[in-house]
């Protein structure tokens, strides 16, 4: 867990989200869900309809969600769970092997395709490693080919599928 603001680049800072960030984080995630839908990518439909608002709020309050800002503007968010969520247990099976699970990595639509997502991903990998954790896991919709390719191109291994979701893992 980071306690203070950390620079990701000269222009961008990462901090733990606080209760003051709940609405902005939910708004960014819904914007990302809308972008996915507009681009005919079947992912995060439940989130777009408000189906995860309470879970998102709880992840912020439990200090699992991070925000990336450029000045005062929120440009990205992600959540790192040190224990499996119900969803992780559904996708990965019940495990207690010390892995961290990445959820809801999202960028503003302006940042998508700019290479910024790669910078955020590399920062969070380093952060997880600094926590003493060597395995990072995530899942994404199996037919979201661009996102699957993004994780493969960034050194993640596709270790299978479950419930139409690709399972990715990286040993740090």
Image (cartoon, helix red, strand yellow):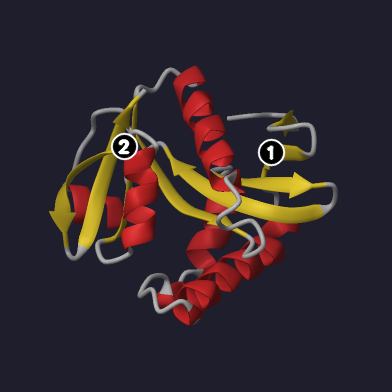
- Give above or below for 42 relative to 130: below
Position of residue 132 in the picture relative to residue 134 (left or right): right
For the N terminus, the quadrant is top right
Position of residue 63 in the picture relative to residue 148 (left or right): right
Mark 2 residue element: loop
- Give above or below for 33 relative to 19: below
Residue mark closest to the camera, 2 vs 1:
2
Q: In this orientation, which residue lies closer to the viewer: 64 or 117? A: 117
Percent of width and height locating residue 119: 58, 37
Mark 1 residue element: strand
Count all numbered tags in the image, as a single digit. 2
The residue drawn where x is 47% and y is 69% is 52
Lower position in the chain sequence, tag 2 or tag 1: 1
Label ID, residue 156 = 2
- Give above or below for 39 relative to 138: below
The answer to whether residue 89 is seen in the rendering is no
The residue drawn where x is 74% and y is 38% is 13
Residue that mark 1 sits on: 14
């Amino acid at each position: 867990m980071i306690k203070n603001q950390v620079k990701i680049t000269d222009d961008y800072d990462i901090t733990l989200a606080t209760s003051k960030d709940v609405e902005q984080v939910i708004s960014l995630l819904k914007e990302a869900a809308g972008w996915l839908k507009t681009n005919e990518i079947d992912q995060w439909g439940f989130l777009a309809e408000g189906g995860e608002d309470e879970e998102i709020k709880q992840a912020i309050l439990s200090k699992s969600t991070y925000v990336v800002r450029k000045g005062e503007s929120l440009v990205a968010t992600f959540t790192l769970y040190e224990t499996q969520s119900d969803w992780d247990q559904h996708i990965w099976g019940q495990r207690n092997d010390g892995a961290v699970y990445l959820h809801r990595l999202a960028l503003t639509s302006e940042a998508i395709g700019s290479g910024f997502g790669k910078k955020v991903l590399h920062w969070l990998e380093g952060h997880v490693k600094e926590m003493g954790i060597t395995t990072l896991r995530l899942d994404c919709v199996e037919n979201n080919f661009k996102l699957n390719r993004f994780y493969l191109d960034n050194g993640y291994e596709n270790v299978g599928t479950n419930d139409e979701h690709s399972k990715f893992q990286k040993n740090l």
